[in-house]
Amino acid sequence: GLYCVSTFCGQYPSGYSFNVGSGSSSDGSFALGGQAGYNYQIPGSQFVIGGVIDFTWLDRSASRTVYGPSVYLQSSNSDEQTFYYDAFKQDWLATARVRAGVAIDNVLLYVSGGLAASGLDSSSYSQTTWTTRTLPSLTNVAAYGAGSSSGTAFGWAAGAGLEWRFAPNWSLFAEYLY
């Protein structure tokens, strides 16, 4: 039969790890969404087929700032320092999947797969400065770059789950999506 679900969850900041230079990072998120689908149990069997669509609003973002190591350039008798900043934001995520499974008493074991789409934004900035050792008060920007992009990314989703019907018209489920 037809079903509808609402979801809410959050994620604590986990941070980045860096191999070069030093820097800071921040990330965190919340999710609020819904899911609707239809299941059909093939008469006289335990097999269930159906479809599911879901849409989730996200506030998933991460950013990092990295300062590269200071490098001495002997040819110009100067020190070079590089700074990087990048940010990422995921605004929404949606999937449209088929699912198939086996019903055993009040439990449905299933697999699913289909299309995934997500709204993404990213930006980055970098700057390289140099300071001459002969005139330390003179600092110039040697290189500068910035960019941003936003759009919709398409891919696929596949997963598996378990759904338990604990009362007529009521169930709990847990699923993993990749």
Image: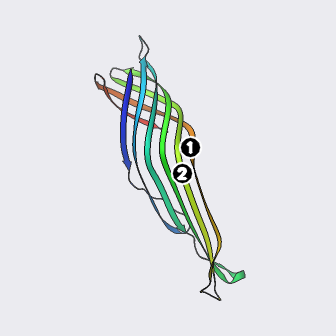
Indicate left or right for 97 with 72 as reference. left
Q: Is residue 86 above or below residue 157?
A: below
Q: Residue at x 47, y 43 (%)?
A: 92
Mark 1 highlights which residue? 152
User: Where residue 78 sits: x, y (%)?
Assistant: 65, 82
User: Where residue 133 sits: x, y (%)?
Assistant: 64, 86
Q: How is the image coloured?
A: rainbow
Q: Residue at x 59, y 76 (%)?
A: 70
Q: Which secondary structure, mark 1?
A: strand
Image quadrant where one finds the N terminus: top left
Q: Residues within 10 Å of mark 2 (few under 14, many from 20)?
A: some
Q: Which amino acid type is marked by label 1?
A: Thr
User: Where residue 167 sits: x, y (%)?
Assistant: 27, 24
Closer-to-camera residue (100/38): 38
Q: Mark 1 to mark 2: distance in Å?
A: 9 Å
Q: Is residue 132 above or below residue 49?
A: below
Q: Is residue 80 above or below residue 62?
A: below
Q: Residues within 10 Å of mark 1 (few under 14, many from 20)?
A: few
Q: Which secondary structure, mark 2?
A: strand
Q: Residue at x 44, y 14 (%)?
A: 42
Q: Quadrant of residue 160?
A: top left
Q: Tag 2 or tag 1, which sits nearer the N-term?
A: 2
Indicate left or right for 58 with 152 as reference. left
Counting labels gives 2
The residue most toward the left is 167
Mark 2 highlights which residue? 121
The residue most toward the right is 75
